[in-house]
Amino acid sequence: MEESQLAARELGLQLHSMEVSSADKYQDAFKEAIRARSGALAVLSTPLASSNQEQIAELAARNRLPAIYVQGSFVTDGGLMSYGPDRTERYRRIAVLWTKFSKVRNQPIFRSSNRRSSSSSSI
């Protein structure tokens, strides 16, 4: 967080950071952000934030606080915008590369676990 504070100062911005320890604390965190006259919100990627995407997006909209999120799924749940890698695209590319690799090796990726069948199958 210290690096973020330094970068904000260099840009002439004031960074107000808050930690939320449980889902029931989000309401208070937004109240604090409004009291601090925050002009925008950046939501970091944490397990707690990921499991409360709809609540966070709804609170940001209700409080008229523009927000940017690390995960695109926040936008699907009502958030304004996101940045960062597209997980779906990443997994698609992995599948394409793995398929190419398996063809080069001329072997299926997975073998069938059905003992009656001697054939193998791949994804």
Image: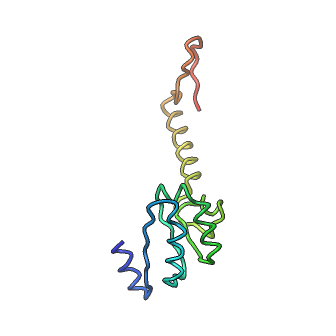
Percent across and percent down for residue 42 are 51, 71
The image quadrant where one finds the N terminus is: bottom left
Q: Quadrant of residue 34?
A: bottom right
Percent across and percent down for residue 11 are 43, 85
The image quadrant where one finds the C terminus is: top right
Say above or below: 5 vs 74. Answer: below
Query: Residue drawn 63% across and 67% down?
Result: 58
For the rendered model, the colour scheme is rainbow
Percent across and percent down for residue 65 are 59, 77
The image shows a total of numbered marks equal to 0
Residue farthest to the top, as pictured:
116
Query: Residue drawn 48% across and 31% down?
Result: 105
Between 39 and 20, the one lying in front of the other is: 20
Residue farthest to the left, as pictured:
2
Say above or below: 117 vs 86. Answer: above
Between 23 and 100, the one lying in front of the other is: 23
Query: Residue drawn 48% across and 83% down?
Result: 36
Percent across and percent down for residue 56 are 58, 65
Say above or below: 46 vs 41. Answer: above
Query: Residue drawn 57% across and 72% down?
Result: 67
